[in-house]
Image (cartoon, coloured by chain):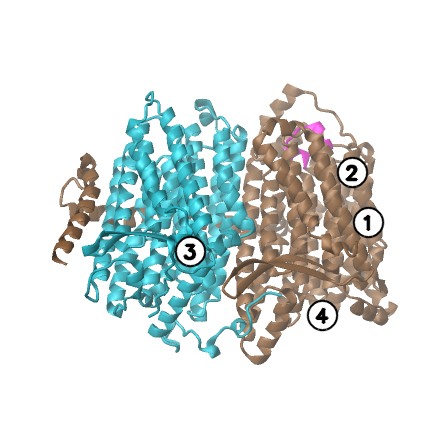
Chain colours: A cyan, B brown
C-alpha cells in the first residue's frame, strides 16, 4: 500500500498558524467572563467580532503563508508529543480536504457573530460558546490524529447543545436533546472505530492518519469500520433516514446558530466521510460506494419532496439542506476526480448558500414573528430589499448558473455520469433520478418565495407587525456571502485549484483499491471494472477535452 | 481594428456591467437610485446601444466573408478534464446578435414610455439589461455547456420579469409556472448534454456531430441510445420555444409587462430554442427519426397555437398563442432539415411579432386611461374597438404586422413562411397540409384581432360588460368602486407618446422589407449562413415549382382574411351562431385551450403536492416516530424523552467526554 501522505515540514511558515487558529478563539472565549460589560452585551459582541475576525485572518494567513495548492500531501504540519505511551500527539496539519473547510469555518463564524448582533439574552455565555465552537470546528478539520478528531468532534457538541437548549424556540429542550442523543450516539461508532483501527495490527497504538493510512486492514475489518463510521457521519451530514434531528434542531435554533449548523456542522460529516471512509478504508469504500450514491439520490428526492410539503419556513430550508447534501454523497461515491471535486465544492458552496438562507430566515422572523407560510404573504410590498436578497439566495440555492451551486452540482453530475466504475444502466438510472432534483428544487423554493413575498399584502400580518426593510448590517452579511458564491460560480478554479492535487491523489488511491477489490472484470448490474478498455465509454478512448 | 469579433465578448459584458452597477445601487442606495430614472435608463440604453454597434460591425464583417472565430479558456479542470468557456462568432451568431440588440434597444426606448408611471422603473430597466446580457451570451456560446448556463440565466430573467408586478397573484403564479415548466425541459437538456458528453467526450456542436457519427459507424454507441440523447436535448428547446406539450407557460407569461412580452416572449428568448436546434443541426441531421419527431412536434404546436388563438378574447393572449403557432413553424422547418428557412422565419417573425406586441402594449396603455390599471379590463377586446381613430400610428403598424404574419407578399412573413411550407411539402406532405391550413387560420385570427381592436365603435365605456368581465375573473365590484372614487379616467384612449410610437414605426420597416433578403431565387440570407447551399438553391429554383405553392399559400391567407372581414368588419357572418353554437364541443375544447392547463393542474401540480404531503407524513410519523420510540425504549422510562428534558441531558455529553478520557487512561495503563 502506498503511503500517500508526503510529509512536509513546517519550516516554511513563520508561526504555527493552525494551532493558533484553534487555540486563540478558545483562549479568547475563556477571557469573556473578565470583560467589563454593562450587561447589555455591547462590549462583548465587539470583542467576539474582533476575535472571530482575527481567527479568520489567521486561517487566511495559514493559507497564504504555508499552504501550496499544488502539493497533494499534508502541509502546515505542527506536531507536539502529548501522551507518548498512547502514541497521542497534538498533531495538526492541512491538505486539500481540510484547507477549504477551515477557511469556510472561520469565515462563516465571523459572519455568524455579526448576525448575532441582536442577541441580548445572556450575551456572555452566547459569545463564549460561539467562539469555543469556532476553535473546536477548526480543530475537527485540522487535527491529524483520530483520537484528537474524536475529542474535537465531541467538544463541538456541547456548545451546540447549549446554544439550542438556551436560545432556542419553544421546543428547544426536545430539539437539543434529540440533537445530542443522535450525534453522541453516532460518535460512539467513531470511538470504537478509532480504537479498533489504532490497535489493529499490534505494536504501539497510534491514531495518526499517516500511520492508519499505511496500515493494511483486512477487508472484513474495513467493512465493519466503514459501516460504523458511515452511521456516525451519516447522522451529521445527514443521510436519510438518520436526518430527523436536523429539522428539529434547525427549527428551534436562532439565526446565528443556524448559520453555523448549516454552514459548518453538516460539512463535518462530508469531510469525515472523505477523510476516514474514503482515505483510510478505500477497499471498503470500493465495495460500498454504490450505497453512497443510492443514499445520495434518496436524500435529494426525499428531502426535496418533504421540503415542498413543509409549511414552516425554517424546516423547509432545513430539508432543502438535506436535499443538497445528497450531491455530496453522489460525488464521494463517484470514483472520479471531477465528481469528488464537485462534492468538495458542493460542501463549500452549500456552506455559503445555506448560511445565507438561514440568516435570511432569521431576519424575516424578526419582523414577521411567524414562520408559518400561511400567515405570510405580500411581504414584498414593504420589504423590497429583503425580497431581493431572498430571491438572489434562493436562485443560488436552486443552482442557477453564475453561482457556486450550479458548478458543484454540474461537476457531480458530469463526474458521476462519466465515471468508469459503474455500469451504464446504473449511471443512467441514478443520473435521471438525481436530475429530478433539478425540477423539484425550484418547485419548493419558488413556491416559498411566492407565498412569502408575492401577492397582496396579508392584512393580518401587516396590521400586527412592523415590517421594516433590510438594514445595512443584514445587507452586508449577505453581500459577504454572495461575493464567494458568485466568485466561485464565475470562476470555480478559485476554489477547486486549492484542493485539486489532494483530490486527485485520493481518487488514485480509490482506483487502486477498486482494482484490488472489484477487479478489472465486470461483476453484475452496478459495478464494472476500471481499465478494461473495451468497456470504457467511447469518450474515454479519446483525450477528453473540449473543442 | 483587424476584426470586431475580437471584441465580441464586450457585447454581453457591457449590459451586464450596467445591470450589476444599477442593481448594486438599488440594494445599497435604494431611494437615490430610484430617483435617477432618466440617467439610469440613458446609461443602460447606451450600453445596449454600444453592444448593438459592435454586433452590427460583426454582422457586416460576416457579410463580407470574415471567418468564424472562437476564443476559449479553461473554466474548470480536474485531472485531465477541462471544461472550457469562451465565445464564438459566426454567421448564425452574428444574425442573432444584430437581431437581439436591435429589438432590445427598441424595447428599452419603448419602455421609457410604457413604464413611465411605474414606481419600479429603474428595477425594470435593470432586468432588461440583465436579460439582454444573458441572451447575447447565449448567442455567443461556443458549446452546449455554456448554452446551458445562459439558457438558465435567460430563464431566470424571464422569471423576474414575468413576476415583475409581484403584488398581482396572476403574475406570481405565471412566473413560477414559467420557470418550472422550463426546468422540466432543462431536465432533459441537462441529461442529454451529459449523455452526449459521455458518448463523445465533447460539448462542441460540430465535434459531437462528427464523433457521434464515428461512434455509430464503429458500433461503440447504439443507434437507439443516440436517438434518445438527441430527443432529451430537444426537450430543452421544447420548453423554451413553447412546443407542445411544454407550451403551457408562454400564454400565462403575458402577465408580465408588455415590453417584456415583445422582447422575451416573442422575439428573443422563445427563439433561443429554435436557435439551439439550428446549432445542433450537425447532430440532428444524422437521425431522420429525430428529425421526424421534431417536425411532428412543430406541426402539432403550430396547429394547436392557431386553433386556440381563434377564440381568445384577451389581446395579448391572442398574440401569445400566435407566437406559439409561429414557433411551431420554425421548429417544423428544423425538422425538415432546413435550418436556414427556420432561422429566416425566426428573424422576420421577431420583427413583426415584436411590433405587434409593442402595438398591443400601446393599446393597453391607452385603454388603462379609460378602464384603469386592471389587466382583466385593459386587455380584453370586448372593451376595445374603434381605436384606429384615436391612435392611428398604432393601428397602421398593427395592420402592417397582421398582413406580414398572414403571409401576403411582398411583406416579410410571406417569404419566410412560404419557404418553410415549401420544404415541408418536399419532406412531409402530410405535415404540409396541416401547416397550410394553419396559415389560413393565422390570417383569420390576426385580422380578427385587428378588427375587434381597431375598427367598429369604441366599447370601453360599456359598464355592464366591465362588470361581467370582472365577475368572470373573480374580481367583481372591487375595481368599479375605485373607478367612481377616482373618476378621472378619460372617456376615450389617446395615441401613445413618441417613445412608444417611434419603435413601432422603426419596426414596421423591416416587417415590410426584410423578406426581400430571402427571396427563393436570390436569398442573401441563405448566402450569409451557407453560401454553398444558397447557390445550389438559386440554381435549382424554378418558377414552375414556386408559383403553385406560393399561390396556394396566398390564396388560403386571403380566404382567412376574407372570413375575418365578413365576420368582424362587415358583420355579414355571425360565427357565434354559425360555428360556435353548432359545434359546442369544439368551441369549448378551444376555449379551454385543449384542456391542457386543467390536465397539468390535476395531474402534475396537485399530484406533486399530494406526493410531497405523503412523504412528509411518512417522515414525521414513521421515520421520526421510530426515533422517538427508540428514545423511549432505550431510556426505559415511562416519561421517555421528557426525562431528559428535566436537565440531565446536559450531563450526557460530559459523560461521553469523560468516558473517552477514561478509556484513554485505561488503555495507556494497560497498553
Give whichever of B376, A160 is nearer the camera: A160
Q: CA distance from mark 2 to mark 4?
A: 40 Å
Per the image, the residue denoted by label 1 is B510
Q: Tell which tag, 1 or 3, sits nearer the viewer.
A: 3
Proximity of marks 4 and 3: CB atoms separated by less than 8 Å: no
Secondary structure, magenta segment, majority class:
helix
- The residue that disc 4 covers is B427
| Residue at mark 1 shares a chain with residue at mark 4 | yes
Q: Nearer the viewer, residue B284 or A530?
A: A530
Q: Within 10 angstroms of label 3, few (less than 14), some, or many (20 or more) residues?
A: many
Question: Residue at label 3?
Answer: A96
Disc 2 crowd rating (10 Å Cα; few below 14, some 14-19, many 20+) is many
> Which quarter of the figure has residue B466?
top right
Residue B496 to residue B251: above or below:
above
How far across and down, in percent of the image, does residue B422 sit? 77, 65
Sequence-first disc among 1 and 4: 4
Find the distance from the CA under tag 4 to the CA under tag 3. Answer: 58 Å
Letter of the chain that mark 2 sits on in the rendering: B
Q: Earlier in the sequence, mark 2 or mark 1?
A: 2
Q: Are marks 2 and 3 on the same chain?
A: no
Q: Which type of secondary structure does the marked residue at label 1 adopt?
A: helix
Amino acid at each position: 500500500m502506498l503511503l500517500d501522505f508526503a510529509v512536509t515540514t513546517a519550516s516554511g511558515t513563520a508561526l504555527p498558524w493552525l494551532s493558533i487558529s484553534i487555540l486563540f478563539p478558545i483562549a479568547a472565549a475563556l477571557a469573556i467572563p473578565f470583560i467589563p460589560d454593562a450587561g447589555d452585551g455591547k462590549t462583548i459582541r465587539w470583542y467576539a467580532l474582533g476575535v472571530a475576525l482575527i481567527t479568520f485572518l489567521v486561517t487566511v494567513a495559514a493559507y497564504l503563508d504555508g499552504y501550496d495548492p499544488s502539493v497533494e500531501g499534508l502541509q502546515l504540519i505542527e506536531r507536539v508529543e502529548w501522551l507518548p505511551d498512547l502514541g497521542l500527539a497534538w498533531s495538526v496539519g492541512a491538505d486539500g480536504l481540510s484547507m477549504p473547510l477551515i477557511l469556510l469555518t472561520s469565515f462563516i463564524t465571523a459572519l455568524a457573530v455579526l448576525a448575532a448582533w441582536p442577541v441580548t439574552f445572556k450575551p456572555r455565555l452566547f459569545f463564549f460558546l460561539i467562539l469555543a465552537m469556532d476553535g473546536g470546528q477548526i480543530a475537527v478539520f485540522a487535527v491529524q490524529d483520530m483520537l484528537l478528531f474524536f475529542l474535537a468532534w465531541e467538544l463541538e457538541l456541547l456548545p451546540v447543545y447549549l446554544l439550542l437548549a438556551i436560545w432556542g424556540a419553544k421546543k428547544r429542550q426536545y430539539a437539543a436533546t434529540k440533537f445530542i442523543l443522535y450525534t453522541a450516539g453516532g460518535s460512539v461508532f467513531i470511538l470504537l472505530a478509532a480504537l479498533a483501527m489504532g490497535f489493529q495490527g499490534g505494536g504501539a497504538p497510534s491514531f495518526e492518519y499517516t500511520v492508519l493510512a499505511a496500515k493494511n486492514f483486512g477487508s472484513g475489518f474495513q467493512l465493519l469500520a466503514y459501516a460504523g463510521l458511515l452511521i456516525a457521519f451519516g447522522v451529521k451530514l445527514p443521510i436519510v433516514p438518520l436526518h430527523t434531528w436536523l429539522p428539529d434542531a434547525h427549527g428551534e435554533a436562532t439565526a446565528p446558530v443556524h448559520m453555523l449548523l448549516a454552514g459548518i456542522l453538516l460539512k463535518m460529516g462530508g469531510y469525515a466521510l472523505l477523510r476516514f471512509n474514503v482515505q483510510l478504508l478505500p477497499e471498503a469504500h470500493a465495495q460500498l460506494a454504490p450505497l453512497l450514491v443510492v443514499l445520495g439520490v434518496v436524500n435529494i428526492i426525499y428531502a426535496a419532496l418533504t421540503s415542498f410539503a413543509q409549511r414552516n419556513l425554517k424546516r423547509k430550508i432545513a430539508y432543502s439542506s438535506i436535499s443538497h447534501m445528497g450531491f455530496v454523497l453522489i460525488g464521494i461515491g463517484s470514483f472520479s476526480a471531477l465528481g469528488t471535486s464537485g462534492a468538495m465544492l458542493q460542501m463549500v458552496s452549500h456552506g455559503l448558500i445555506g448560511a445565507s438562507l438561514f440568516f435570511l430566515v432569521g431576519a424575516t422572523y424578526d419582523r414577521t414573528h411567524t414562520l408559518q407560510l400561511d400567515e405570510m404573504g405580500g411581504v414584498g410590498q414593504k420589504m423590497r430589499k429583503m425580497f431581493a436578497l431572498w430571491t438572489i439566495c434562493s436562485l443560488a440555492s436552486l443552482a442557477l448558473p453564475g453561482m457556486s451551486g450550479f458548478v458543484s452540482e454540474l461537476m457531480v453530475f458530469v463526474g458521476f455520469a462519466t465515471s468508469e466504475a459503474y455500469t451504464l444502466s446504473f449511471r443512467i438510472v441514478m443520473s435521471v433520478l438525481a436530475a429530478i432534483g433539478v425540477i423539484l428544487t425550484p418547485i419548493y423554493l419558488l413556491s416559498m418565495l411566492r407565498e412569502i413575498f408575492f401577492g397582496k399584502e396579508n392584512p393580518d400580518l401587516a396590521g400586527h407587525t412592523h415590517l421594516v426593510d433590510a438594514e445595512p448590517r443584514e445587507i452586508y452579511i449577505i453581500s459577504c456571502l454572495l461575493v464567494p458564491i458568485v466568485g466561485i460560480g464565475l470562476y470555480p478554479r478559485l476554489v477547486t485549484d486549492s484542493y485539486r492535487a489532494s483530490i486527485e491523489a485520493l481518487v488514485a488511491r480509490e482506483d487502486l483499491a477498486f482494482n484490488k477489490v472489484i477487479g478489472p472484470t465486470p461483476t453484475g448490474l452496478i459495478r464494472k471494472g476500471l481499465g478494461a478498455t473495451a468497456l470504457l465509454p467511447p469518450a474515454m478512448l479519446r483525450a477528453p477535452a473540449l473543442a | 481594428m483587424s476584426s470586431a469579433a475580437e471584441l465580441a465578448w464586450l457585447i454581453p459584458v457591457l449590459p451586464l456591467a450596467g445591470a450589476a452597477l444599477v442593481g448594486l445601487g438599488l440594494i445599497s442606495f435604494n431611494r437615490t437610485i430610484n430617483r435617477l430614472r432618466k440617467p439610469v435608463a440613458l446609461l443602460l440604453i447606451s450600453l445596449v446601444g454600444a453592444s448593438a454597434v459592435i454586433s452590427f460591425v460583426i454582422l457586416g464583417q460576416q457579410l463580407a466573408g470574415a471567418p468564424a472565430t472562437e476564443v476559449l479558456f479553461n473554466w474548470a479542470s480536474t485531472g485531465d478534464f477541462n471544461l472550457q468557456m469562451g465565445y464564438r462568432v459566426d454567421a448564425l451568431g452574428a444574425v442573432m446578435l444584430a437581431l437581439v440588440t436591435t429589438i432590445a434597444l427598441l424595447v428599452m426606448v419603448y419602455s421609457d414610455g410604457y413604464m413611465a408611471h411605474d414606481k419600479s422603473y429603474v428595477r425594470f430597466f435593470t432586468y432588461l439589461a440583465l436579460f439582454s446580457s444573458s441572451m447575447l451570451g447565449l448567442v455567443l456560446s461556443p458549446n452546449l455547456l455554456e448554452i446551458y448556463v445562459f439558457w438558465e440565466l435567460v430563464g431566470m430573467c424571464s422569471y423576474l420579469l414575468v413576476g415583475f408586478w409581484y403584488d398581482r397573484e396572476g403574475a406570481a403564479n405565471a412566473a413560477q409556472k414559467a420557470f418550472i415548466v422550463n426546468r422540466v425541459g432543462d431536465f432533459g437538456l441537462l441529461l442529454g448534454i451529459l449523455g452526449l458528453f459521455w458518448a463523445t467526450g465533447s460539448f462542441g456542436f460540430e465535434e459531437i456531430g462528427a464523433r457521434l457519427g464515428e461512434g455509430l459507424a464503429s458500433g461503440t454507441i447504439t443507434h437507439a441510445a443516440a436517438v434518445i440523447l438527441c430527443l432529451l436535448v430537444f426537450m430543452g428547446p421544447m420548453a423554451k420555444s413553447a412546443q407542445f406539450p411544454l407550451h403551457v407557460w408562454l400564454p400565462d407569461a403575458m402577465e408580465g409587462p408588455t415590453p417584456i412580452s415583445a422582447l422575451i416572449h416573442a422575439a428573443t428568448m422563445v427563439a433561443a430554442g429554435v436557435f439551439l436546434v439550428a446549432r445542433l443541426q450537425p447532430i440532428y441531421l444524422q437521425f431522420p427519426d429525430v428529425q421526424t419527431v421534431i417536425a411532428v412536434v412543430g406541426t402539432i404546436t403550430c396547429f394547436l397555437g392557431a386553433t386556440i388563438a381563434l377564440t381568445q378574447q384577451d389581446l395579448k393572449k391572442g398574440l401569445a398563442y400566435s407566437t406559439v403557432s409561429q414557433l411551431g413553424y420554425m421548429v417544423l422547418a428544423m425538422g425538415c432539415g432546413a435550418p436556414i428557412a427556420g432561422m429566416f422565419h425566426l428573424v422576420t417573425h421577431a420583427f413583426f411579432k415584436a411590433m405587434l406586441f409593442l402595438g398591443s402594449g400601446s393599446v393597453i396603455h391607452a385603454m388603462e386611461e379609460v378602464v384603469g390599471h386592471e389587466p382583466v379590463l385593459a386587455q380584453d377586446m370586448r372593451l376595445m374597438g374603434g381605436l384606429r381613430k384615436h391612435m392611428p400610428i398604432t393601428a397602421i403598424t398593427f395592420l402592417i404586422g397582421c398582413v406580414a404574419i398572414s403571409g401576403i407578399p411582398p411583406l416579410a412573413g410571406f417569404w419566410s413562411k412560404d419557404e418553410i411550407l415549401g420544404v415541408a411539402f418536399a419532406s412531409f406532405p402530410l405535415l404540409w397540409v396541416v401547416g397550410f391550413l394553419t396559415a389560413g387560420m393565422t390570417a383569420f385570427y390576426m385580422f380578427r384581432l385587428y378588427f375587434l381592436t381597431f375598427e367598429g365603435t369604441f366599447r370601453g365605456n360599456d359598464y355592464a360588460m366591465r362588470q361581467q368581465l370582472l365577475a368572470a375573473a373573480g374580481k367583481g365590484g372591487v375595481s368599479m368602486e375605485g373607478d367612481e372614487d377616482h373618476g378621472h379616467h378619460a372617456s376615450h384612449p389617446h395615441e401613445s407618446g413618441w417613445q412608444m410610437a417611434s419603435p413601432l414605426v422603426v419596426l414596421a420597416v423591416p416587417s415590410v422589407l426584410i423578406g426581400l433578403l430571402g427571396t427563393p431565387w436570390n436569398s442573401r440570407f441563405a448566402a450569409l449562413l451557407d453560401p454553398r447551399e444558397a447557390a445550389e438553391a438559386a440554381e435549382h429554383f424554378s418558377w414552375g415549382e414556386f408559383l403553385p405553392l406560393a399561390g396556394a399559400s396566398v390564396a388560403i391567407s386571403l380566404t382567412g382574411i376574407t372570413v375575418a372581414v365578413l365576420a368582424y368588419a362587415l358583420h355579414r357572418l355571425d360565427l357565434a351562431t354559425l360555428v360556435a353554437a353548432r359545434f359546442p364541443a369544439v368551441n369549448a375544447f378551444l376555449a379551454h385551450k385543449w384542456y391542457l392547463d386543467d390536465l397539468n393542474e390535476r395531474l402534475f401540480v396537485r399530484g406533486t403536492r399530494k406526493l410531497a404531503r405523503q412523504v412528509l407524513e411518512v417522515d414525521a410519523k414513521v421515520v421520526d416516530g421510530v426515533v422517538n420510540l427508540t428514545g423511549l425504549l432505550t431510556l426505559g422510562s415511562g416519561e421517555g424523552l421528557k426525562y431528559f428534558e428535566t436537565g440531565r441531558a446536559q450531563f450526557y455529553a460530559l459523560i461521553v467526554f469523560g468516558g473517552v478520557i477514561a478509556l484513554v487512561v485505561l488503555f495507556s495503563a494497560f497498553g
